[in-house]
């Protein structure tokens, strides 16, 4: 059986998962914002400082400055920007691979070291430099300007903060509602649609026997499935009870006239189709009106019940027994000829003679008259063979000199 959880637990778990995703998104996006903002700020700030340093360096070199004047310039720049550490690395000096790449590529680059950022920019020989550096060529890398700058000193504009916060908020909303949409659709909407679809397929009482199945992990939704199936079971029982009531005689428990009309037509069709035998016996109790008038209807009911029991014990399981009126009964006998039906009449008569109705000091003999007819021999319709059987039953009454 599939494990289920309650709706409250589902909501709690979903909220926990949502918050976890949102926190993860904050961390990931925050890291991205930090990284992208730092990189952007580094480029802006370092670019400004690099331009400032370059301008000063070129000015000093243009005016014929020497190594001491350049060192003095660097110290002045570091003093004016106390948070920055500025170095000028020459090609013949030992340096890191990061600086070597800048020498080779002649492009500025950025690196991070702990809480500092390192900005390296190549110093390219200009025409002004060639007056002193006669052995060099214009466009060659003279040195690399290396500036180390604390990350905390970088500044992000208010506009950038608002844009990034808005993007982060939008991402949170999209992730949160997307997850809820997917989970609600999977655990609620889809199962309910499945239930509706299966309910719409139930068009008659036979469909009630089909179990409704909902693929869900939510306990409350699963309980809807169970409640619906229980309701269907109750409806089946109610239908069967109603069918039994509508098709059986309430006193004797055997089939009634309605069921006789249904079965007789069906048996006639099968008999005609397969060329089988079918016989019918009409039975009427003798002196039943006298019993009711003399001893009361409750005694008459007891006799009807006893009579039904005795006849039911005398017939086969394949035979059908009906009460079609007050003391009128019909037997439908498939695969039975009129001769075989006559043998059954003798068997029932003997049974009745050997079983008297007794109640306290009261003792009553149950007597009945019989009329038999065979389909195809005596008639081709239900009405036709019943009419013949009725006539023979009344002839039997006359021979016994009995009245109703």
Image (cartoon, rainbow, N blue to C red):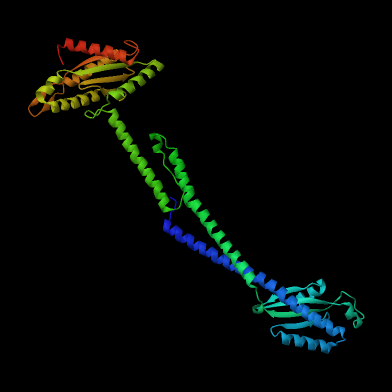
Residue 309 placement (x, y as % from top left): 21, 26
Residue occupying the point 55% across, 56% down: 178
Report the front residue among 64 and 356. Answer: 64
Give the number of marks: 0
**Residue 211 higher or lower than 188, as above or below:** above
Viewed as shown, does residue 107 lie left or right of 379?
A: right
In the image, residue 101 lies at what x, y percent?
79, 73
On screen, residue 168 versus residue 92, left or right, reads left
Q: Residue at x 79, y 75 (%)?
A: 100
For this view, does 328 lie left or right of residue 84?
A: left
Q: Residue at x 51, y 64 (%)?
A: 19
Quadrant that contains the C terminus: top left
Up-down relation of residue 188 to residue 112 (above or below): above
Residue 119 visible within the image: no
Q: Position of residue 284 (x, y in %)?
A: 20, 18
Return the residue nearer the eye: 367 or 67: 67
Tell me where residue 99 appears, x and y as whole percent: 77, 76
Report if residue 264 is visible in the image. yes
Indicate whether 95 appears above or below 402: below
Q: Using the image, determine if residue 94 lies above or below residue 5.
A: below
Front-most of residues 131 and 35: 131
Which quarter of the figure has residue 110?
bottom right
């Amino acid at each position: 059986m599939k494990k289920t959880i309650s709706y409250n637990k589902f909501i709690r778990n979903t909220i926990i998962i949502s918050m976890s995703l949102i926190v993860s998104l904050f961390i990931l996006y925050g890291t991205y914002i930090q990284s992208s903002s730092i990189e952007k700020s580094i480029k802006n700030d370092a670019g400004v400082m690099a331009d400032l340093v370059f301008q000063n360096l070129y000015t000093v070199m243009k005016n014929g400055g020497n190594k001491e004047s350049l060192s003095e310039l660097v110290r002045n720049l570091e003093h004016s920007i106390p948070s920055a550490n500025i170095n000028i690395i020459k090609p013949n000096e030992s340096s890191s691979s990061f600086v070597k790449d800048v020498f080779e590529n002649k492009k500025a680059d950025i690196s991070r070291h702990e809480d500092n950022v390192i900005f390296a920019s190549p110093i390219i020989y200009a025409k002004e430099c060639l007056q002193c550096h006669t052995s060099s060529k214009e466009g060659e890398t003279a040195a690399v300007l290396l500036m180390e700058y604390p990350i905390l000193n970088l500044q992000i504009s208010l506009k950038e903060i608002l844009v990034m916060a808005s993007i982060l908020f939008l991402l949170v909303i999209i992730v949160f509602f997307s997850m809820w949409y997917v989970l609600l659709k999977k655990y609620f909407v889809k199962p309910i649609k499945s239930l509706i679809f299966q309910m719409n397929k139930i068009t008659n009482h036979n469909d009630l026997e089909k179990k409704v199945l909902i693929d869900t992990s939510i306990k409350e939704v699963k309980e809807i499935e169970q409640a619906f199936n229980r309701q269907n079971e109750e409806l089946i029982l109610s239908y069967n009870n109603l069918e039994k009531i509508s098709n059986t005689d309430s006193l004797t428990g055997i089939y009634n006239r309605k069921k006789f009309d249904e079965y007789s037509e069906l048996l006639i069709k099968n008999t005609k189709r397969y060329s089988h035998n079918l016989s019918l016996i009409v039975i009427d109790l003798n002196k039943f009106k006298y019993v009711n008038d003399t001893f009361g209807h409750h005694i008459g009911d007891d006799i009807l019940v006893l009579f039904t029991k005795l006849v039911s014990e005398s017939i086969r399981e394949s035979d059908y027994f009906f009460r079609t009126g007050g003391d009128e009964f019909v037997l439908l006998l498939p695969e039975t000829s009129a001769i075989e039906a006559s043998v059954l009449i003798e068997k029932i008569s003997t049974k009745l003679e050997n079983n008297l109705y007794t109640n306290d000091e009261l003792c009553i003999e149950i007597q009945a008259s019989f009329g038999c007819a065979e389909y195809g021999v005596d008639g081709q319709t239900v009405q036709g063979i019943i009419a013949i059987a009725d006539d023979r039953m009344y002839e039997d009454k006359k021979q016994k000199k009995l009245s109703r």
